[in-house]
Structures are given as structure tokens and as C-alpha cells.
Image: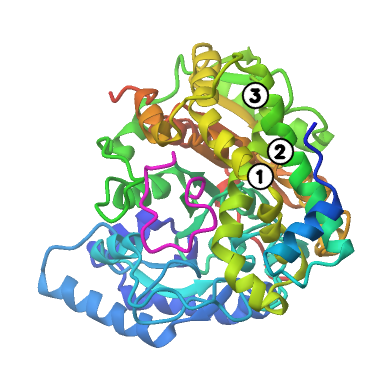
Amino acid sequence: MNRIDSKAVLALARAQGHAWVDEAAAQRIAAGATAAVAAVEASLRQGEAGLLIEDSAGFLATLEQLAEPTR
Amino acid sequence: MSLENWTLVEVADAIRARRVTSREVVETCLARIGAWQPRINAFAAVLADSARAAADRADAAVAAGVPLGPLHGVPLAHKDMFFRASRCSSLGSRHAPPAPGAVESSLLGRLDAAGAIEIGTLNMCEFALGPTGHNAWLGDCRNPWHTDHIACGSSSGGGAAVAARLAFGSFGSDTGGSVRLPASACGVLGLKPTNGRVTLAGMMPLSASVDVPGVFARSARDVARLLGIVAGRDPRDPRSSGLPVPDYAAALERGIAGVRVGVPQNYFLEGVASDVAERLQQSLHSLAALGADVVPVTVPTPEHMTELSRVLVYSEAAAIHGPWLREHAQDYSPQVRMRAATGLAIPAAAYQQAQQLRPGILRRFVEAVFAKCDVLHLPTLGIPVPTLAETDVGGSAAMWEKIAVLVRCTAPFNYLGLPALSVPCGFTDNGLPTSFQLVGRPFAEATLLRVANAYEGVTDWVRRAPAMH
């Protein structure tokens, strides 16, 4: 699993100039980012194996294709 | 019935028919704002002078017999994040970062063209990042049914102001439940339209690929009128859909005999408080008595969708706020600072994967669920509305858990982009409102409103008003 720990968050924050991020903030940020990224990995595991080539720009088109028929 | 309890459609029709003047309606709202604002803090700014002047112009137009728009002379108020070129929006913040000059919200422009009057701007969570209604800079927005309790957020002022009869309707934004949650907590209807149904142009982005403007009102008919005015393609917003806009008001009349109402058998009813569950069950009995077919439905993996939505929201929020946050971190409250910064730690590949997964997950969800039902029926908020003190966790370790409880039933539909409507269905044991949530296929707002309208016809929850204690 892709675990993002507070040390990694602190390093990323420093690299991006966010000096306000301290250890406590880094722990909170790490917890949120880890949970979010874990959901991506779980969803990838549920999908078909292989390259992920779906075009994300097609989301609105997908909504429109699946629209309730107008009466 | 006193004027403040009229619905938006009733008041609009009365102004047109000269049974009441716009000035009378505006003065009624201003008097109520004067009484309620110190208690609930729903407004960021009250625009009394300009509203009175607009009301007088509206009344002169009625007298002159010129063509009138469908909201002619009706006072509304919106979350303080729809830009006007003539003013600075607070965005619920301490010092809002400068927005590009002379930006005008397309949504406000459509409401202006329909004749609406803006009576003020509404309190909101800081930068629309928060489900409770706490605000360290503008002051907390409080629930008009009991001021110790939260109004929910992030469009906190919209739920509170419409419930307290301070405005006849409102627009907010919904990125994780930010219209549906305050609507549920305050006892009014709250619609999150399909993503792309309503223009985003000139609205502060939190996460443009997830954001959608949403409606607060006190009847399905009111929501139908407001949505019909703002829906449809906007050349200024490439994410807006060109699909035709149906006649939402006409759809209300069809009844719900034979409509299949799906009840999720997994996830959404887990951990729901007993008094909320009881009201949900009663609402299902009412819908069945109206002729709906209540059917069980298994819903595909919603537990991942909330987190997938967070990947998009936090990554995009970090992109928007990163430069300002780096230099002005002290201008953000601790929780908002950390949530906006969470995107700094999400790998770019994970963000792109969450985007790429979205169409396929949507397709599978729609095919699995809406083959079996026409609308899903589930909680908006699975617990009784908590107090301000219970949810005042700031940036502490309890932050993620508290947020997760509040958005558990709303955020999955932001990832999916589906329309969702919160409908009041009674009160929990603590005396605060609760609701059910209807979710439909993409662009099925008319069906959701049709079910809500039928339910309103046999219940009186939306007609009950909070009393000032």
C-alpha cells in the first residue's frame, strides 16, 4: 500500500515552501492523503488489469450518455 | 398565512398579480433579518439599500405593464462566493485572495435577468471547505431551530436563511454535500444538480471538476422554478452541458404511481441513528401509499467514492490555494489550512487515476442501480444534527473522523456527478430537522422533484417554520 507518512509530508511541504507545516499538521495531512490514495488503489484493484487508458475528459459526455430520457 | 411563509412561487405570482408589492416583500425579509441575524448569523452582508431600490424599480415595472421575469421582485440571497464585478466576495475568509478583476457570476446574471432581487450575501464555511458551518472569521452560522446546533455547511447561510424565512430561495455550492447537509439540518429542500447542469462561471472554485451550484427552497415547485432559470449551457463554462433543459414545473404534476424507489441494502443505512431511521421508514410508507414501488437495491462500492472525491477536491484545492497558503498561512483557520494542504501530499498520478476511473465507476453504478429503480432513497445525514460544541474540532486529530460522519451519504454522489435532492421528513428526538435524500440518473432532476412534490402533498414538514425563542 502507498503509505504517506508525516516525514514524507514534511519533506514535501518544505520542498514546496510551506514552512508552516509542523509535525502535528504533517500527521493530519498524512492521514488524509493516505486514506484518499488508498481508495484509488482499491478501485484500481477492482478494475480490469492492464493499462488505465480511459480519457478523464469524457466525464461530462458519460453523464450525458447515461442521462434519463426526456419525456 | 403571513407573507414570510408564502413560497417563492406564491410570492412571485402575487407580485405579478399586484396582490403584494415587491417593496412589501423586501421589507418583510429585512425586518426578519433584523430580528434573526443576531441569533443565527446567516448573512455575511445585508444589502438593504440596494434591495429597497431594486424593489421600487420592480414595482414601477409592474405598474408600467412591461414584461416581467419569473422571479420579478422576489428577494433571494446566496452564498458569498458568486462573484459580482462591483464588489469583493468574502468567500468566508479572513482576507480573501484577490480574484481576477471584473468577474461576474453567470448564475447571478441569469437570476438578475429573471427579475430577482439580491437582499444580501450569506455566511459560509471558509473557502467552502467544511461541513459544519463553523467560521472563525465571519462567526459561526447557527441553526434556526436551535441555536446551540450547527446549520451544517459549507453553504450554512443558505439553509439557515431560507428556513428562517429571511429569503425566498438561495444558491450555494455542493462539492461534498454543502447544499444538501445544511438543507437537511435546517428543514428545507436542497438540490445538488447533475454536474454540468448549472454553470460554474464566476463562482469561486473549490474543485472545478466536482463543484456544482445548488438550490435551497421551501417547496419542490420553488426548486423547479429556480433550477429552470439557471440550468443550461453557458458559453463561459466549458464544463456546462448542452442537453435541453426540461420544463421542471410541468414534470411535478405527473404523480409517482409506479415510480421505483430503491432502498440501498448496503453502506448507506449502516450506523444510521434510530430516530433518523424511523423517519426514513415513515417517508417510505408515505411514498408507497402514493403508488411508488419500494424495492431493495445493492449499491456498488460507495465507501471508496467519498475518498476518490477527496483525491480530486484536495488536489484541486491545493493547486488553487497553494501559492496564497504558502505566503498567508495565518489567514487560514487550522482545519481549512490542513485540508487545503492535503492535496500537496497526494501524488499527481493518484489524482489522474481518480479522474480516469470516474467515467467507468459512474457507468457501472448507473447500470447496476438504475436498472432496478428510478430513484434511490437514503439518508442525507445519518445522525441527528449535532451541536456546535460537539463538532468544534478545529484541526485536531478528530477532524477526519467528524467530517467523514457528516459527508458519508452525500460525498459519493459528488464523485459520481449524479443529481441528489434532500427532502425534509420530520424531526429527530433532539427537535432538529432530518431528511431523506433522493438520487437519480444523470439529469433526472425532474424525477427527483416530482417525487418530492408528491411527498409534500401528503406531509407538512416543509411548511413548518422555526420559532424565535
Q: CA distance from mark 1 to mark 3?
A: 15 Å
Q: Chain of mark 1?
A: B
Left or right position of A27 against B441 = right
**Amino acid type, mark 1:** Pro
Q: Secondary structure at mark 2?
A: helix
In the rendered image, which residue does mark 3 sit on?
A44
In the rendered image, which residue does mark 2 sit on?
A37
Q: In this picture, is B456 found above or below B4?
A: above
Classed neighbour count for the residue bearing mark 1: other residues with Cα under 10 Å, few (<14), some (14–19), many (≥20): some
In the image, residue B328 lies at what x, y percent?
66, 78
Q: Do labels 1 and 2 touch, CB within 8 Å?
A: yes
Quadrant location, the C terminus of chain B: bottom right
In the image, residue B315 lies at what x, y percent?
60, 51
Left or right position of B47 against B18 = right
Q: Which residues are magenta?
A: B194-211
Left or right position of A8 against B319 = right
